[in-house]
Amino acid sequence: SQERDGRPQKTYDFVIIGGGTAGNTIANRLTEDPTINVLVLEAGGTNEGVINSIIPNFCPRLIGTSADWNFTTTGQVGLSNRSIEYPRGHILGGSSSTNFLVYTRGTSEDYDRYASVTNDPTWSWVNVQKFFARNERFTHSADHHNLSGQYDPNVHSTSGMTAVSLASLSSSFGPRVIQATSQLSNEFPFRLDMNSGSHLGVGWVQSTIDVNKRSSSATSYLANPFNKRPNLHVQLNSQVSRVLGSSDSPSHQQAFRTVEFRVGSGSLQTVLATKEVILSAGSIGTPTILLNSGIGDPNELSKINIKPVVNLPSVGKNLTDQPLLVNSWKVTATDTNDEVARNVTLAAQQLLEWQTSGTGPLVNGIVDLLGWLRLPTNNTIFQDVSDPAAGPNTAHYELVFQNAAGGPEPSGNFMSINTIVASPTSRGSVSLSSADPFKKPIIDPALLASDEDMKVMIFALRQAFQFLTAPVWKNIVVGPIFNLTAKSTDEQFMSYIRQHTGTVFHPVGTAAMSAKNSHYGVVDPDLRVKGVTGLRIADASIFPFIPTAHPQAAVYVVGEKASDMIKSTWNLK
Ligand SMILES: Cc1cc2nc3c(=O)[nH]c(=O)nc-3n(C[C@H](O)[C@H](O)[C@H](O)COP(=O)(O)OP(=O)(O)OC[C@H]3O[C@@H](n4cnc5c(N)ncnc54)[C@H](O)[C@@H]3O)c2cc1C
């Protein structure tokens, strides 16, 4: 049952903090057992009827709305001291209700590295396959086109929860990118399926789209009939301030089974989990709640008058995100997606087509193809620091191909090759400025803070120019609409990059897992918070390294794997 104003009862078996990507996954799986009950506390409102969340192509419109936490970063040293918007989903489904829908798993090396740093083989690529399969329900595209040659059906599941599909074909752009991969096949090989565990190359994007609508954790794991389960209570507009400790006998550790929250701007109340509290508030929300609860670095907490309760200095540290730079070129092709932003009649037509027949350009997200690429082996960027990629088959940088300019242009047609540092070396933090639990945290994602990340971004942008030397672009590409050419110096690249880079919205790592008994980290590989009882964390904050991916698929794996572990701890069905 979804309740907006009703007060929850005072005890549950499990309380899940955050009805987001991982949180709703766990809410569904635990309530498969009718003998236990679960409360989900979600700060945001309902996803139902939120049209910008439903129509795939409208995804960017959610930024800055009430479905967004509307965070901003500190001044970023790597971005000429600019502070930038830092969106996070504030709505049932969390960021899975507001993200840009790209479905990428990362590489086998990403998961094998999680297994090796945590000393727990259950995190290896081979061992997490069943969780991808439980999550994914691969489906057809809105235009029913033949998908052969665009993906590998052998690495996909059709029986999971969250829909995944290829885009409907709408233009000459995608086929041109594919042709360029055969013309420049050494540097930019074609990749049939980047979700096979090996992602290097350029291929078609897969998205969490159910034919023509967004598929989120709210529309899949909390769909009817799951949301009608009598043992599941989802409480919206309920922001958690803290988890409260009490001494647990006989272990003498602190138990954190009491959750403090308020509904709307009402007064504080508490609810008790008799079995476990599961913290799934995301990479920003989770460390914020932990720090407010006195779980973190005791010195830093004392300075802002929060009583230190558990000494875990890694809370809020290790924030890792991927810098993104949007780069657009003017083209002679006329079948781009630019016109709709400046033509209200066309916009109304597209909306009507989506509403009446579920077809047309709005069924797609905003990304057409992706490329996952490495620096050449003789490149010297990582000669003095260790290579941050998860392994030799994992990308250093990513190219994002879009059949439009990055933003609305007054006239003309465009294409974009956006560049991302996929394996960054920079690390930032989430911290608090005061003991007020409802105050926004201080977010420093340290974008392009390291020299290596800047050098990789320069390299990636040079490679975007290189991609456009393929013969297929002759007579198509007119030139960049930014102030650089392939011949510009590194200094010129650097100054442009610092002025214009932002984020691809992938913060992770602020409550990282590490091996049992290790001197750093926040959770053990079973996702239990170190040194306490009653509290697990399951969301994007637990990754010790950023998945070399748009991370939602990996977060769903965290949700499914956490559910498995919790069920086995408590002998649930
Ligand atoms: C604009 C944007 C675009 C993105 N694009 C993509 C993409 O195309 N592909 C991709 O794979 N990934 C993308 N991502 C990233 C991806 O969506 C996230 O990594 C993933 O959804 C995170 O899941 P999570 O469970 O960790 O957190 P979330 O899904 O964000 O869930 C956290 C939930 O906790 C709630 N919460 C937080 N604090 C509290 C509190 N104190 N009390 C109660 N509730 C609380 C939040 O409201 C939210 O519902 C994007 C993200 C954004 C913001």
Image (cartoon, rainbow, N blue to C red):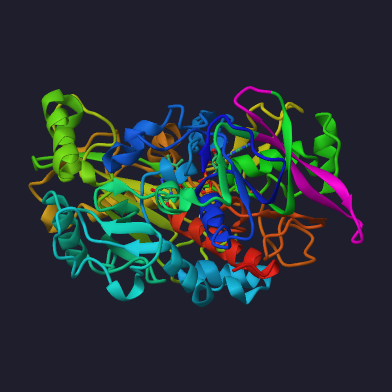
* Left or right of 386, for residue 130: left
Residue at image coords 68%, 44%: 316
Residue closest to the eye, 216 or 154:
216
- Relative to residue 560, is residue 54 depicted above or below? above
Q: Quadrant of the C terminus?
A: bottom right
- Relative to residue 341, is residue 211 depicted above or below? below
Q: Residue 287: x and y, percent?
A: 67, 43
What predominant SS class does the magenta segment belong to?
strand
Residue closest to the eye, 430 or 127:
127
Q: Is residue 425 visible?
A: no
* Left or right of 53, for residue 88: right
Q: How many numbered dots are placed on residues in this image?
A: 0
Q: Is residue 37 visible?
A: yes
The quadrant holding residue 358 is top left
Residue at image coords 25%, 51%: 368
Residue closest to the eye, 435 or 260:
260
The quadrant holding residue 276 is bottom right
Magenta stretch encompasses residue 229? no
- Relative to residue 258, is residue 185 depicted above or below? below
Residue closest to the eye, 125 or 477:
125
Q: Residue 252: x and y, percent?
A: 92, 57
Residue at image coords 51%, 71%: 128
Q: Residue 212: x and y, percent?
A: 24, 48
Magenta stretch encompasses residue 265? yes
* Left or right of 350, for residue 459: right
Q: Residue 139: x and y, percent?
A: 27, 61
Q: Which residues are magenta?
A: 240-266
